[in-house]
């Protein structure tokens, strides 16, 4: 999020006083130390400025996504891919990944281990939105093992057409803005308004069902600043006290509050601390330092659990 903030500040060009004044408020908030979510929240931005923010956000994330595609195409080793394929060494036929990210990391990770996945769109170069779930994947006569990826804030390959259709296009360059609008929900005032429409509404409902039924949670890099997700996590933890692990380079204050006050009595939080790691648990709610380096990263964490 910090990289996106920098990218927007360096690349967004306003036109006219209305855009200029609105963007100045955002830049001032960022300069005062607010994270991007807080800087945009509660501010009424002109539609033209929102369009620019969406386009630049798409380009910023896509630049990194292209690098990941190259890694995936060259047999890249994805920590998430290793975790998912090992999770299927069980009786599970479905694994649910709920993400607020627009990137295709989860999809590439599945590809890296030949694991099937679904995001709500039918397969193909021009993908149609399948809100009814009619597309079923089978292996022989049995239902195939599938990772269901719930991208509640949209994806780089989701678009709204000029004639108001929802389609998926697996592209790595932003199509003409006259014909396609990226379906990604950016932080700010309209964030929750857009999610009342499909594909977001159906995706959020699917994510809610997955979170409500989960027997455990592994949260990677999640800041606990999103009202679409953490209420369901908190509810499940209170109901069932499910095991919960939170990994992040730096745990946000919101993440620490969740662990200490809302995650129940069966949690583990890990973040970077100097050359080692800091671990939070019910016995050490304020955290304790360990010498193990990078334990907070999914790659290193995998070595302890797989």
Image: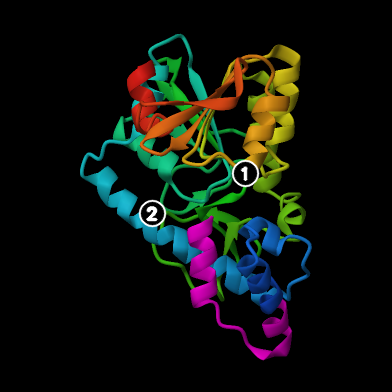
Q: Which residue is mark 2?
A: 65
* Quadrant into which the C terminus falls: top left
Direction from residue 38 to residue 168 in the image, left or right = left
- Nearest the camera: 83 or 144? 83
Residue 129: tell me if it is visible. Answer: yes
Q: Is residue 143 above or below residue 180?
A: above
What segment is highlighted magenta in the picture? 1-22
Which residue is outermost to the left? Answer: 74
| Quadrant housing residue 281 | top right
Direction from residue 101 to residue 162 in the image, left or right = right
Q: Which residue is mark 1?
A: 152
Measured as percent of width and height from the top left, residue 272 is found at 44, 37
The colouring scheme, among rainbow, by chain, secondary structure or one colour, is: rainbow
Q: Is residue 10 shown in magenta?
A: yes
Measured as percent of width and height from the top left, residue 74 is found at 20, 44
How far apart marks 2 and 1 lie (CA) works out to: 18 Å
Count residues near mark 1 (Cα–Cα under 10 Å), then give few for <14, some for 14-19, many for 20+.
many
- Nearest the camera: 103 or 224? 224
Per the image, label 2 sits on a secondary structure element best described as helix
Q: Is residue 304 above or below residue 168?
A: above
> Residue at the spot x=42%, y=47% of the render?
124
* Quadrant into which the N terminus falls: bottom right
Q: Is residue 136 above or below residue 199?
A: above
* Main SS class of the magenta portion in the image: helix
Q: Is residue 280 above or below residue 225?
A: above
- Nearest the camera: 41 or 62? 41
Count residues near mark 2 (Cα–Cα under 10 Å), then give few for <14, some for 14-19, many for 20+.
some
The reply to whether dot 2 and dot 1 touch (C-beta < 8 Å) is: no
Measured as percent of width and height from the top left, residue 123 is found at 45, 42
> Residue at the spot x=54%, y=64% of the render?
5
Direction from residue 150 to residue 69 in the image, left or right = left
> Residue at the spot x=58%, y=50% of the render?
154
């Amino acid at each position: 999020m910090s990289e996106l903030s920098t990218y927007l500040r360096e690349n967004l060009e306003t036109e006219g006083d209305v855009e200029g004044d609105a963007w100045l408020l955002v830049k001032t908030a960022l300069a005062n130390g607010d994270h991007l979510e807080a800087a945009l929240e509660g501010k009424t931005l002109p539609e033209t400025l929102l369009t620019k923010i969406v386009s630049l956000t798409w380009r910023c994330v896509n630049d990194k996504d292209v690098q990941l595609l190259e890694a995936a195409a060259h047999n890249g080793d994805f920590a998430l891919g290793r975790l998912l394929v090992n999770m299927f060494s069980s009786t599970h036929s479905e694994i649910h990944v709920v993400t607020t990210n627009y990137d295709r990391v989860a999809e590439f990770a599945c590809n890296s281990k030949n694991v099937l996945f679904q995001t709500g769109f039918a397969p193909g170069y021009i993908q149609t939105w399948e809100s009814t779930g009619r597309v079923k994947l089978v292996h022989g006569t049995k239902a195939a093992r599938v990772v269901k990826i719930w991208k509640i804030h949209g994806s780089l390959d989701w678009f709204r057409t000029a004639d108001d259709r929802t389609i998926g296009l697996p592209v790595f360059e932003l199509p003409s803005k006259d014909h396609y609008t990226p379906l990604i929900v950016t932080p700010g005032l309209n964030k929750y308004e857009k999610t009342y429409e499909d594909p977001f509404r159906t995706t959020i409902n699917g994510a809610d069902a997955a979170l409500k039924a989960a027997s455990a949670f592994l949260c990677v890099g999640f800041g606990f600043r999103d009202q679409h997700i953490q209420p369901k996590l908190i509810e499940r933890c209170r109901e069932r006290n499910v095991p919960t692990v939170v990994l992040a380079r730096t745990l946000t204050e919101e993440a620490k509050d969740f662990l200490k006050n809302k995650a129940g009595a069966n949690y583990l939080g890990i973040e970077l601390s100097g050359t080692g790691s800091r671990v939070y648990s019910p016995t050490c709610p304020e955290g304790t330092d360990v010498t193990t380096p990078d334990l907070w990263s999914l790659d290193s964490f995998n070595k302890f659990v797989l």
